[in-house]
């Protein structure tokens, strides 16, 4: 197998020959070959090879072939010669997303800016495009794709089905439809790697870690769909618990329930942007309030042991660890954001008054000169958790977000695992470079999955 980077040129010629520089022919072990099969994504065509004397590694594709083969643009990309007589151009990387509200300038809604960043970074090494599920033509095995031009504007081009897909569909509801399930199965049948299969529910994560003894010691005691008796028992055991929806996000619907033997039961939550605190003399009154607010949806709740987290100014802090698979298919911690809860808030979400900090800022204020040791320990825990989840998950993972806490005894706890983590931590001025590293990791993992492993720089 040989892999190299070359300059692809699109020419107006009408013949069916591809012109290849001597240096490139030698690099691909194709010297003396008269014909090869050229591949791009799911398409392939037999072509006649004509050597040319030109310094460097160059491939010239005529207009007639470009139309059939659907090469999206000229520029620097990889060429892979895995089997004798076969040359693959690319990789062709598809970013799948969608939006309920889209426009010509924002076809992917609030995710448009993030997707543009991936395309800009990827254009230097591959063919990277974005698409929504409805842009696929399964009969022709093509995608009506979104590319960006040098001016940063969107252009539509039809390309073959890609070599690899990074799934950033934004809606839990959409992902459970039969249409999306069928779409994923179709990609699998065509052996197109598809990573970040779907969102996690909290129950998914607990089930995945259930038999992982080492990793499970970082998970607080958690019970799915608990009865009133279980909630009461856990309150008496732990003094406070978190009661939250299994498919929730952004802290919506979360309660912090507390039991103080001589004072009663307390429920802290957020409603209409305000932090609420209610007191109940009897446990039955607390349960009536919860049932009144949520009814049957409480069947989809989990009760979780409360943990006394490290605090700043009397407010607990937790941490978002943004994890990626790299170009060697290994888990790496790419970014860490510390979140300090707002006064009286049940969560550390910024929308509920939380404050985003760097982990160094947060931990130095709570643990002093032990901060760096604690960060390193938490990174090791995050990688251990990612590996444990991946061992038990039936689909491909390439990205994870962990909400971790560190208690006053320096014990690390995992509260949440997200298969499609948000990117709000990268808005912090000190985490901009980590945001760029995140995008590089996405592209490097796409190169790995599509077998276009980088061995030399363009």
Image: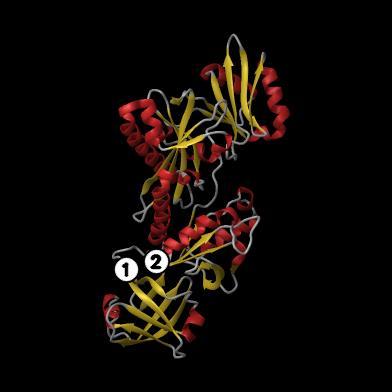
**In the displayed structure, would residue 165 be above or below residue 335?**
below
Q: Residue at x 27, y 81 (%)?
A: 55
CB contact under 8 Å: marks 1 and 2: yes
**Residue 37: x percent and y percent?**
40, 80
Let me know if residue 228 appears in the view. Answer: yes
Q: Residue at x 64, y 59 (%)?
A: 102
Mark 1 secondary-structure assignment: loop
Q: Residue at x 41, y 32 (%)?
A: 362
Q: Is residue 54 left or right of residue 165?
A: left
Tally the numbered discs: 2
**Residue 199: x percent and y percent?**
55, 47
**Residue 178: x percent and y percent?**
64, 56
The span from disc 1 to disc 2 (Cα, nearest Å) is: 9 Å
Badge 1 is on which residue? 458
Between 310 and 69, the residue placed more toward the observer is 310
Badge 2 is on which residue? 124
Q: Is residue 30 left or right of residue 40?
A: left
Mark 2 secondary-structure assignment: loop
Q: Is residue 146 left or right of residue 436?
A: right
**In the displayed structure, would residue 323 be above or below residue 206?**
below
For the N terminus, the quadrant is bottom left
First-in-chain label (1 vs 2) = 2
């Amino acid at each position: 197998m040989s892999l190299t980077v070359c300059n692809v040129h699109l020419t107006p010629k009408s013949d069916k020959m591809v012109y290849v520089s001597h240096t490139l022919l030698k690099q691909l072990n194709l010297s003396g070959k008269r014909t090869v099969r050229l591949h791009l994504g799911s398409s392939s065509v037999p072509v006649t090879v004509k050597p040319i004397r030109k310094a460097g590694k160059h491939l010239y594709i005529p207009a007639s072939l470009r139309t059939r083969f659907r090469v999206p643009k000229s520029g620097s990309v990889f060429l892979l010669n895995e089997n004798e007589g076969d040359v693959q151009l690319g990789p062709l990387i598809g970013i799948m997303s969608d939006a309920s509200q889209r426009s010509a300038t924002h076809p992917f809604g609030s995710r448009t800016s993030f997707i543009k960043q991936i395309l800009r970074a990827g254009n230097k090494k591959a063919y990277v495009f974005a698409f929504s599920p409805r842009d696929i033509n399964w009969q022709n095995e093509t995608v009506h794709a979104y590319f960006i031009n040098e001016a940063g504007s969107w252009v539509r081009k039809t390309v073959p089905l890609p070599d690899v897909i990074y799934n950033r569909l934004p809606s839990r509801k959409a992902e459970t439809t039969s249409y999306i399930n069928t779409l994923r199965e179709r990609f699998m049948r065509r052996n197109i790697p598809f990573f970040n299969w779907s969102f996690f529910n909290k129950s998914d994560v607990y089930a995945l870690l259930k038999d992982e003894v080492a990793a499970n010691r970082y998970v607080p005691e958690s019970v799915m769909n608990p009865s009133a008796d279980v909630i009461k028992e856990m309150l008496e055991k732990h003094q406070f618990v978190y009661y939250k929806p299994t498919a929730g996000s952004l802290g919506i619907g979360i309660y912090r329930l507390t039991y103080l033997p001589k004072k009663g039961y307390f429920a802290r939550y957020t409603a209409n942007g305000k932090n609420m605190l209610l007191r109940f003399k009897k446990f039955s009154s607390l349960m009536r309030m919860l049932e009144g607010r949520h009814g049957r949806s409480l069947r989809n709740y989990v009760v979780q042991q409360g943990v006394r987290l490290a605090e700043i100014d009397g407010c607990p802090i937790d941490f978002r660890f943004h994890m990626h698979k790299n170009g060697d298919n290994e888990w790496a911690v790419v970014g860490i954001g510390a979140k300090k809860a707002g006064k009286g808030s049940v969560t550390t979400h910024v929308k509920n008054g939380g404050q985003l900090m760097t982990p160094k800022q947060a931990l130095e204020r709570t643990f002093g000169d032990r901060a760096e040791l604690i960060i390193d320990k938490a990174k090791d825990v995050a990688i251990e958790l990612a590996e444990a989840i991946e061992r038990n998950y039936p689909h491909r993972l390439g990205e994870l977000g962990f909400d971790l806490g560190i208690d006053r005894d320096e014990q690390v706890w995992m509260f949440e695992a997200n298969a499609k983590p948000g990117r709000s931590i990268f808005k912090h001025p000190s985490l901009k470079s980590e945001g760029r590293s995140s995008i590089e990791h996405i592209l490097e993992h796409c190169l790995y999955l599509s077998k276009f492993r980088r061995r030399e720089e363009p």
